[in-house]
Image: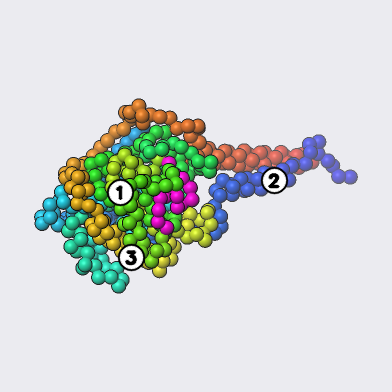
Amino acid sequence: MALTSAHPAPPLLVCRLLALALTLALASARKIPASITPISRDLYHSSDSILGEIKALVARNSDSLTMDTVRASNKGYSAEMFVVTFNHAKETVEDGSKIKIMLSFGQHGRELITSEVALSLLYILTEKRRIAGVDLSSFEKILEHLVIKVVPMENFNGRKRVEAGELCDRRNGRGVDLNRNWSVDWGKKEKDYNPFEEDPGTAPFSEPEAQIMQELSKSFKPHIWVNVHSGMEALFMPYDHKNTTPDGAPSQLMRSLLENLNRRHFQDSCLVGSGGGAVGYLAHGTTTDYLYDIAKVPMPFTFEIYGDEKASTDDCFKMFNPVEKTTFDRVINKWCMAFLILFEEGLRILPGSQVASQGALDNWVPMGGEILERNADEKSGNENRQLEGLDLGMQELKTYFRLFIISTFLLMFMFCSRISKNRNRESGNF
């Protein structure tokens, strides 16, 4: 007759069920589909290497390029930004008569292709890197009448998050969407508002990156500003926060420039119009709307330079960036050429009175690579408006959830080990 234990048999089934639950929970926490596309390291520079290459380019072309490093901080969070200035004919053409153009790339961390365009454009401007089938000599005289500031990577901290594996993240280093942190119509939320995508921050210009760009708009006083993104192909003008464009002659000039560019270079294949009217949703607190309404930039635009409509919404790198070399090269060449045509159109279409009214170029932050340190803990009453609702702190919640999963695993392991020891001890007694 078999002897039986006074204790019930170890619940091994319970252990197996707990292990299965843990596996499912971990898979849910990651939310990474098997088909996700990683960053194409053979095509794309890292954030550090692209900035290092630009520094070397500036050092080789000091007759036409300078670079400034600008830093700002707010409530323990700091940001650093590099601003490259191209001034081709310093000695022969007076700066006050030139068209001033501001180009900003990489405002959203996941849009790596935009910074690659910035790098290639700087090579074309300085070292005459060729675009297949294009004679760039005709643009030489045009460049003599321009001063161009390029921010190759506006959101350096957010880009680092993407390179660390958060491939769908568009926000800055503390989870704020920099293209929702400007003051025009700030904080308003549409019905489909997604806090992970569109967190506007705790107040207008709460983020150091937005503060630096605002400072640039005030001091440089550009005639043309282009905020470069990816996700589709489009040429947008204000407004983003409503389904309309501004009234009057300035708006007609903006539309005329974009339509000429679209016809000459894109064969009318790009969407043209207001961001709010053409993209399919309204966006509040954007750079472009502030630049037009508050900073009074005559021609602020948003260019969308690439998008893969067939990519899964979870496959963000593929959705926002070309992943094979042929397409990568085509996007780079096409949009570098688009900027050259933009320069030509801007020089042709901007009235001389608008150029003269913008002021001299020396009204800016320290030049020649000096560092401007700004601390923005002290905010004006208007900037201290609180964000409606709760800040969900998505990144912190993810961290806590992962710690919970690890703790659960350890407890399960200890539980199963204890059961195994009890069983062995009981087997020894019999």
Q: Is residue 106 left or right of residue 367?
A: right
Residue that label 3 marks: 264
Query: Quick check: marks 2 and 1 in contact, CB under 8 Å?
Result: no
Q: Of all residues shown, which one is farthest toward the left?
A: 91
Image coordinates of residue 39 in percent, x first then y, are 44, 58
Q: Nearer the viewer, residue 300 or 77?
A: 300
Type of residue at label 2?
A: Leu
Sooner in the amino-acid sequence: mark 2 or mark 1: 2
**In whole angstroms, how far apart are the C-alphas of marks 2 and 3?**
64 Å
The reply to whether the magenta stretch includes residue 247 is no
Residue found at x 86% / y 45%: 2
**Which of the two labelled residues, at mark 2 and mark 3, occupies the earlier sequence position?**
2
Q: Which mark is residue 366?
A: none
The residue beneath circle 2 is 17
**Secondary element at image label 3:** helix
Query: What's drawn in magenta, residue-wise?
Result: 271-284
Amino acid type shown at disc 3? Arg
Membership of 280 in magenta stretch? yes
Number of the front mark, 3 or 1: 1
Between circles 2 and 1, the one closer to the viewer is 1
Using residue 56 as the reference point, say whether residue 226 is left or right of it: right
